[in-house]
Amino acid sequence: MEAAAGVQPLAPHRRVELAASAAAVQLRVLQFGAALLPLVYWPWTYDSYVLPKLLLARTLVLVLAALLVIRWMAAGAITVKRTPLDLPLLAFIASALLSTIAGVNVNVGLFGNYTRYDGLLTLITYAALFWLAVQALKDGEDARGLLRAMLVGAYLVALLAIGQWMLDKLHGVAIPRAYGTIGNANVLGAYLVMLMGYAYYELSRPRQAGSRLIAANALCLLGLALLLTVSQSAWLGLAAAAVVLVAGGQFRALPRRWQIGSVAAVVAVLAAAAPIIGSRSTDIAQRIGIWGDTLRLIASRPLVGYGPDTFGLVYPRFQSAEWVLGYAQIDKAHAELLQVAATQGLVGLAILLWIMAVFVMTLWRQRRLPVMWPLLAGWVAYQVVLMVNFTALGSAFPFWIFAAASMVLMRSTTEARMVPSRSRVPAVAGGVVAAAGLVALAFSAVVLPYLADASLRDAVIAEQTFRPGDAAAAAARARDLNPQESVYAAEAGNVAFGNQDLAAARAAYLDAARLGTFSPRLFRDLAVVDSDLGLQNEALAAAQQAVYLDRFDPANQALLAQMSSPSP
């Protein structure tokens, strides 16, 4: 059979074994990745917190996709599980694509801003991770195992965050906040509060005393880390989760001695935490001011918005006051619904509300299942945090894995099976093409971005240690490896400026501006370079752009006044 083509088909029993092995590996990879995603921190890149998580998520997606293709080839059939969220997610990605094309900066819309990466490609990664996680989960038992793996990861994240808080306290930080390997206290809070409902569910299930003690230990550690984030939005999310659990009658599952012990523990924690709770005051007027400005921004382009992750490029035009003193730039609306409306317009906002409604309705249909209430509590808690913050991939990647497990636990998947042609040659050829495509994606989406950011770190270190030649070489390497990242072009400009290579500095700064940046400093430096090159009109334009991005900074105003004054 197909001897001329040199294709030797596997025996039927070997194909079944290969498909089963691929499925088992797929599940283990998903569990390991779900636990590791929030834990990963890599000091050998310049962005040690966010980029490593993005690259790991991309790697996880590619590995899961490769294993799924192997399963399909071994089984001789393409089996796909569908969920009620599939269509809304596709619509949301289509909306983001439209907003990217019609947006103010296509490059930023595609790739996002440095340390945020909230562009179209990341939205696609969220959807791909959700879809592939659903494909990897055979049944509710697999989904529960996945959630337990996530709890293991959350336990380690909480432990490290508490340790980091203690070190900051010992080093005299005035108001220490736990952020751990996530890198941001609010994002850590969103991640932890999402899983605490399920952690409580594991505690409340009828089990041996030893198992309950372990579950109680995990829940208490997550709660302590959540407290030390000093994140009011996360605490609000926890309160919302508690309301959901009470409404679902979940607290009745605990024996009376556990209820009394839980209440006593909560009282003790609140008493001990009173100084922490009162240590940080958040001025709600800041958020309200940003939200008011954002409404005017949305009204200026209501249908499709300005493009994913472009908020920082556009917001200065609508900013009415210096809402946050000492903060670099406001690049988010600090309210998820407003953020989506600003970047994807009312079309994107409507689809986001559709996604939310579908998720809640899917869970509500299975409200007789005890596990539904903890899942709903986690979803509500996460969304409450986002309502006064924004999506950040440190918590968003775990959320979409959580969503996949929820769909499977709610028995909301349907299976479609397609048997292709009996000929093995097209199947093998398709597998080879898929493998080549995945390798190419891994190189371009994982390897190159990693090498580029490691080179940026080398450039900054060389610049700080007065090695201009090494700094220039490393900055150029970063720029070549990842030419769509404006920060790498900006660093090349900074190094050239320091070396008095004004022409090279100007070219790099202009490239960074074209790629998309909301850094006033870059335009101040560009104005100085243009002035030194005798390009007075260009220098004035650069100074005006710096003022546009932050008119509240006296340095920007002073430079504009200098560039506007007639030459002696």
Image (spheres, rainbow, N blue to C red):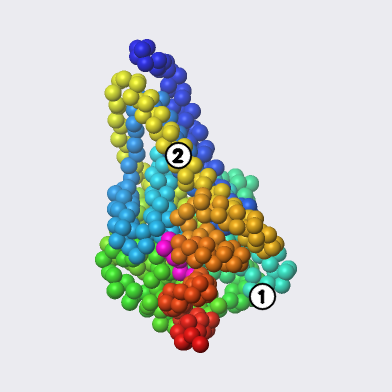
Q: Quadrant of residue 456?
A: bottom right
CB within 8 Å, label 2 to label 1: no
Q: Earlier in the sequence, mark 2 or mark 1?
A: 1
444 left or right of 41?
A: left
Tell me the residue that label 2 is attached to: 440
Relative placement, left or right, of 433 versus 169 is: left
Can you give x and y, in whole percent of width and height, for residue 567 in the image? 48, 85
Describe the element under mark 2 as helix, strand or loop. helix
Residue 463, image x, y percentages: 65, 62
Q: Please state which amino acid type lies under the numbered disc 1.
A: Ala
Q: Closer to the camera, 486 or 371? A: 486
Q: Residue at x 62, y 50 (%)?
A: 214
Q: Residue furthest right?
A: 170
Q: CA distance from mark 2 to mark 1?
A: 48 Å
Q: Is residue 144 above or below residue 280?
A: above
Q: Are there few (<14), some (14-19), or many (20+) residues within 10 Å of tag 1?
A: few
Front-most of residues 562 and 264: 562
Q: Would you say 493 lies left or right of 371 here?
A: right
Q: Which residue is mark 1?
A: 174
Instruction: Return the x and y of residue 250 as percentages of the image width and height.
Output: 46, 57
Q: Is residue 353 above or below residue 402?
A: below
Quadrant of res 510:
bottom left
Seen from the viewer's position, the closer of residues 302 and 386 is 302
Task: Read off the magenta span.
Answer: 512-519
Residue at screen point 42% across, 53% down = 122
The residue drawn where x is 47% and y is 30% is 22
The secondary element bearing badge 1 is classed as: loop
Q: How many marks?
A: 2
The percent position of residue 372, horizontal first and vertical second, equals: 41, 52
The answer to whether residue 344 is visible is no
Q: What amino acid is at disc 2?
A: Ala
Q: Is-magenta flag for residue 247?
A: no
